Image: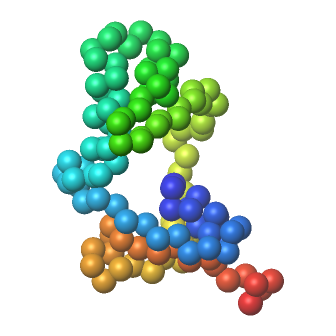
Amino acid sequence: MYKAELQAWANASGLEIHVSHYPPGTSKWDPIEHRLFSPISLNWRGEPLRSFDIVVNFIANTTTKTGLRVRAVLDTREYATGRKVDKATLAALNIERNDFHGNWNYIIKPQLTEESA
């Protein structure tokens, strides 16, 4: 589903979207996890997370000595679940796969339409 949404964004913006996923089992090397999640965990120091407001407040008030400041808001919108993308839509995606692990690294390019050609 997300690839179809990225394709729609690429089409609307005219931008190429470069996507690079971490391979399965390698999230321990994700620099965002190291820089963000550890300070958040230290900030709440085992306090019970009894409500969304408490969680968002702990996250939003996280800072570090090196200058990291976290902003957080609770998203209360409802999102559709179980959405499916048909095979024709997936086949029409304008994806250029990288030579190195193209299933994890690729570019979604805007689709040319008659108006943009």
Task: Say if 58 sits above or below 39 in the image.
Answer: above
Residue 52 visible here:
no
Residue 52, horizontal then vertical, whole percent: 49, 18
Task: Say if 54 sits above or below 10 in the image.
Answer: above
Q: Residue at x 43, y 66 (%)?
A: 19
Residue 18, horizontal then vertical, whole percent: 47, 71
Residue 8, horizontal then vertical, whole percent: 64, 64
- Lateral position of residue 100 relative to residue 36, left or right: left
The residue lying furthest to the bottom in this view is: 117
Q: Residue at x 41, y 73 (%)?
A: 106
- Lateral position of residue 8 relative to residue 86, left or right: right
- Lateral position of residue 36 relative to residue 14, left or right: left
Quadrant of the rendered image containing residue 68 = top left
Task: Say if 25 sits above or below 77 in the image.
Answer: below
Task: Say if 83 sits above or below 78 in the image.
Answer: below
Residue 97 visible here:
yes
- State how many labels appear: 0
